Image (cartoon, grey):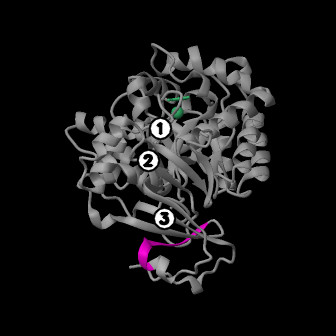
Amino acid sequence: MPLWKTKNSTFKGPRHAIRGAIFHCLGDPGPEGDTSKTEYFADGLLLIEDGHILECGPAEPALAQLSKNIPVTDYSGKLILPGFIDSHIHYPQTDIIASYGTRLLEWLNKYTFPTEARFDDPEHAREVAEFFLDELLRNGTTTAMVMPTIHPTSVDALFSAAQKRNMRLITGKVLMDRHAPDNLRDTPQTAYEQSRELIEKWHKRDRLLYAITPRFAPTSTDEQLSEAGKLANLYPDTYIHSHVAENLEEVAWVKELFPWSRSYLDVYDQFGLLRERALFAHGIHLDETDRKRLHNSGAALAFCPTSNTFLGSGLFDLESNRQHHIRVGLATDVGGGTSFSMLQTLSDAYKIQQLAGRQLAPTQGIYLATLGSAHALYLEDKLGNFLPGKEADFIVLDTEATPLISRRMQACDSIEQKLFVFMMLGDDRAIYASHILGKQTYLRDADEV
Ligand code: GUN
Ligand code: FE
């Protein structure tokens, strides 16, 4: 039971409290849904000071002890969760989500590259970045690792928009010096210089973090990957963000382009790009050696269920990665992915597990979308649950979001069942509010009179 040790607080800012049902994870509940890794308060209270969690526990004893002057936001009847963390998404692809009929390499050429070429225009980049972050918050995603384009303007636009919203966000200029249209190619030198400038400008400014971002091995020469490795070594506390082993045609192409490599993952390894705070999207077609290497290096994978099915790429082996103790985050991968909603993403994640003859426990699903993604991004000391000292990014889910959800919820007699209903039937309509550092930054019904 929490002690409400309010006197011992190291923070000195204003306090407020949030009341409602509260669920969060303390670790990975796994496919069995281990309840010792989760905490649920049917009538809970979050005590927040200066944008950070001071305490989380049952409401009544806390309210009896707290000063009557503390303002309480009452979400009784609704469910409070840590904000979702989308570990891999492309903001320039907002306008090509739901593009018909192709697999990865054709999809890149036909839809992705033409739309990304527009981001040399700062006004276009700004407009899309604003829409994109509003859409994340509407879907209960409070932090994301984001791929922009090769244009420094696209990085400035996204960081500025995130800074305005006080969001914790990771991004960095995409590096591509081959196998892309003329207007989407940089060089090893400009990639290095522009990345350095952007790191100096943005990394660790407010809640913003920088990722060195070679798009994927086929669009970078050996020379450019080597420059990226130099940057990764020079700035060891930055992130590395890329794609690996998504599609079989892509894997075969990498073998042709880097004939000396043991595997696709090995290409990144040889250029010094496998390390802590490196995250690779997809990782569908990996072998045992790759998995051991991922674990030993501390690099993470992003599980992108809606994208992996939409682009026909394959089925991510979540359980094998778990057995190898590899850090795995959940990701929408918009616009290869088909939804900004992490709830919809969990619905596809569950179905992919079913196709492999396994289950995804509802609590394991919520873990992946919150603390698991935080762990993959080396942010578990700051985000992912409601332990004291963490940043107070949280969301409020509506058990009466739609007539069907409301009806189905009435038949639930445990928090696990309710979480599963949200996973299968929920989307942006289920997100009632999103809070950043304690402050409400999105309210679903704000426009209603
Ligand atoms: N591999 C290289 N670029 C991309 C991209 O934009 N989306 C996906 N899904 N895979 C990629
Ligand atoms: Fe991607």
Q: In which quarter of the image is residue 249?
A: top left
Mark 2 or mark 3, earlier in chain: 3
Is residue 153 found left or right of 269 in the rendered image? right
Three-letter amino acid code at the position of disc 3? Arg
Between the C-alphas of marks 2 and 3, the distance is 14 Å
Residue 19 - label: 3
Which stretch did the figure color magenta? 52-61
Residue contact at pointers 2 and 1, CB within 8 angstroms: yes
Residue 166 appears in the rendering: yes
Q: Is residue 90 magenta?
A: no
Name the spot of residue 44 as percent of width and height, x first: 42, 67
Name the residue that disc number 1 marks: 429
Q: Position of residue 255 (x, y in %)?
A: 46, 27
Q: Quadrant of the image for the C terminus?
A: top right
Amino acid type assigned to the residue bearing label 1 in the image: Arg
Which residue, as the protein is rendered here, is positioned at the far bottom? Answer: 7
- Kind of residue sitting beneath label 2: Asp
Whichever of labels 2 and 1 marks the residue nearer the N terminus, that label is 2
Residue 74 position (above or below residue 281) = below
Name which of mark 3 and mark 1 comes first in the sequence: 3
**Label 2 C-beta lies within 8 Å of the nearest ligand 2 atom:** no
Q: Which residue is drawn at the image coordinates 33% and 64% (left, top)? A: 37
Q: At 53% from the left edge and 28% from the top edge, which residue is drawn?
A: 335
